[in-house]
Amino acid sequence: MALIGVVVAAGAAGGFSADDEGASPGTNGTIGVSGLAVPATTPTPAAVITVPTTALAQKSVLDEPLGKGMGGDDVEAVQGRLKELGFDPGPIDGQFGEITRAAVWAFEKLIMQTPRSEATGIVTNDMWQRMQDPLVVVPRRPDADSDNHTEVYLPEQVVIFFQGDKAVLISHMSSGTGEKWCEEVTISPGEYGNEEGTEPLKRGECGVSTTPGGVYHYERRIEGVRQSALGGLWNPVYFNYGIAIHGALQVPLEPASHGCIRIPLPLSEYYQQLTANGDQVYVFDGVEEPEHYGAQLPIFNTRDPDYSTTTSTSTTVAPAVTPAPVTPAPPPQAAATQP
């Protein structure tokens, strides 16, 4: 890594200044169907400001792009800077692994505004220059009704945990695919559909893998592993019936869940400490503002009529062209939307 000449970092190059119109949207807009005030203007990405400063800053350059499988001092420097900005790359050990790549994905999508489908997980010199700017990520909803809150950005597939207005953890995520499915599921005791059970329950269910936009609150949390149709949920925190934020072994670049918000497994070891039951959760779907929906219910699963204990089905069909209407209340046979 070579050193660039001394530069002056001042103002808001490439981002919003603290005084830019739209950096912190107000709530004097229209009233949504939920009865909540919908902000008149909201930036598509989270507001990213470059802190005004007159201090001289030294920037370095990368001799080559950095990607998964590489190692060395340059990787360690990138990991350290990501950590400072709130993107957890895993251990600061100079080894570019899966968790570091996930942190780079989040930086690409949120800060560089790279479309999700074009993210590479490779740190170019241009990205490294931007990473060295005095950046601060501020919330879209600084006026949340809880001291701490979470913002989920479905188009970018990024989730941010705020304490006050400080982003304490920014993570790549994977949400619902939008596909219909029918398969055998396992429901742990205490979960929706097996509330009174003492043993895991297996049965055939069908559903639609959606993550609804809206405004929610964390309701409950469980430490450890819960069973689901796609495997285990590590340390889930639920905010919309069976929809939770949880750790997962597989958090690909594209949406891949049955509706839950997957984050990298190592982050799930501590993210519960950053949240509390009652904290507000805003889910932005890129179509309407969360306040337009309010606490929108998920599409509840139904029993698979073709399922038997001797012959189970596991079928994923094409994505729904028109999403099923939101059910006003869980049907008698409804179970939690799977992760």
Image: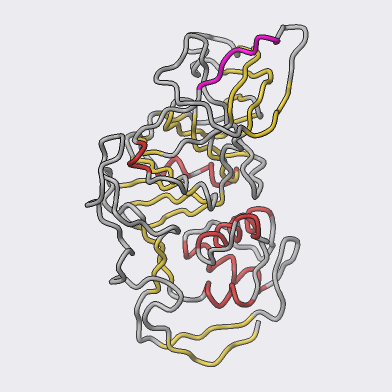
Q: Position of residue 7 (x, y in %)?
A: 47, 89
Q: Is residue 314 above or below residue 132?
A: above
Q: Position of residue 53 (x, y in %)?
A: 35, 82
Question: Magenta region's main secondary structure?
Answer: loop
Q: Is residue 334 above or below residue 23?
A: above
Left or right: residue 58 versus residue 179 is left
Q: Residue at x 34, y 73 (%)?
A: 17
Q: Position of residue 27 (x, y in %)?
A: 24, 51
Q: Is residue 81 magenta?
A: no
Q: Is residue 326 above or below residue 173?
A: above
Q: How is the image coloured?
A: secondary structure
Q: Position of residue 99 (x, y in %)?
A: 63, 53
Furthest-top residue in view? 309
Residue 317 image-quadrant placement: top right
Left or right: residue 92 versus residue 317 is left
Asked whether 209 or 145 is in front, the reply is: 209
The span shown in magenta is 300-306
Left or right: residue 19 versus residue 50 is left
Q: Is residue 303 magenta?
A: yes
Q: Residue at x 66, y 29 (%)?
A: 230
- Quadrant where the image shows the C terminus: top right
- Quadrant where the image shows the N terminus: bottom right
